[in-house]
Image (spheres, rainbow, N blue to C red):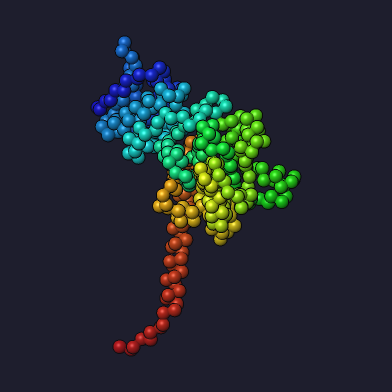
Amino acid sequence: MNRRIIRMDYPQATAKIFGNFDCHARRIEKQFSVTLRNRETEAGDSIVIEGEDEELVSAAAQCVSYLHELSGKTEEISDQSLQYALDMVSAGQGNELASLGDACICVTTRGKPVKAKTVGQQQYIESIRKNTIVLGVGPAGTGKTFLAVAMAVKALREKQVNRIILTRPAIEAGEKLGFLPGDLQSKIDPYLRPLYDALYEMLGVETYQKLMEKGTIEIAPLAYMRGRTLDDSFIILDEAQNATPEQMKMFLTRLGFNSKAVVTGDLTQTDLPRGQKSGLAAAVKILAGIEDIGIHYFSERDVVRHRLVQKIIQAYEKYDREQARRESERKSAGAQKFRAEKMPHRPDSGK
């Protein structure tokens, strides 16, 4: 029997790691085939990890050690944080968890600190800090837009920029804007709602409205960016997978002096007409390797929504791979049949 002991240095650390009714502990035990138990001594609490496999015990200890550090920074360990730790350690990437710092980007109106929850998010934030233009590509729920808005608010508060500009392509997701009631702005607003929500969270409604009236914050459809030069601005293009290559080029060339641009999108959720290329897909190929332009790819591990979202993304990726495989086999079979039909018939020589 192999054993590891992790000493608890933070108040209520053991309770946080074990979770309500030991739900977290049971998931750790199941993942690594170990048993966890609490040991109370005069020197303090410890968590004892035991199991038959030495490597699995070490992996469980690495996971518990990370959760122990996390317990000193948060009121509780969320289901998402636990699952992320389990996934990273199981994939042999547990050492990367140490790179997750405690740096706070900003604080929401409810007093909640905004910080990276995954290694991928931490790398994304660092890329925004270091580069003038950053393309953040990845699935839904990875915090692409929310973190970009947080960095924009931070830059505005620290007077690094004079205004924040947020934009989105107004593309119908299988529905028609023309049938919606109201004027053009009323029809466009639903597409910009996620941007409004993120700013409300960071600034509060009253502060947001004051900044909007002053022109310090601007939210507009992508088409409204044409012909402008944007100096001293933090510019965010959201849902960029729905921009055409021409629109993407137009947006990127709006960049003025002392400005920063973040482009976010999910290439698996394009609403462009069939056959129309995505400007984001083209941009990540065209701009790769250019200095001061960062391209960051998120994975399903960076999803910080309900853990079912991660499973849904994985299921769709598996389905898409299977469909691509079948289509490849179908085309290959068709090509072989075509060659066979075109091949000249050779009569029997009679020998």
Q: Residue furthest front?
A: 257
Along the viewing direction, whichever of 197 and 349 lies nearer the viewer: 197
Q: Residue at x 54, y 41 (%)?
A: 232
| Closer to the camera in the image, 292 or 91 | 292
Depth check: give the residue in front, 56 or 280.
Answer: 280
What percent of the width, then of the height, locates residue 265?
52, 47
Q: Position of residue 217 (x, y in %)?
A: 61, 38
Q: Quarter of the image holding residue 162?
A: top right
Q: Residue at x 39, y 33 (%)?
A: 100
Q: Quadrant of the N terminus?
A: top left
Can I make out residue 160 in this image? yes
Residue at left offset 63%, top offset 51%: 223
Which residue sits at x=28%, y=25%?
A: 4
Q: Is residue 350 above or below residue 19?
A: below
Instruction: Please give left or right for residue 44 compared with residue 308 in the image.
Output: left
The quadrant of the picture occupied by the C terminus is bottom left
Percent position of residue 159, x then y: 53, 34
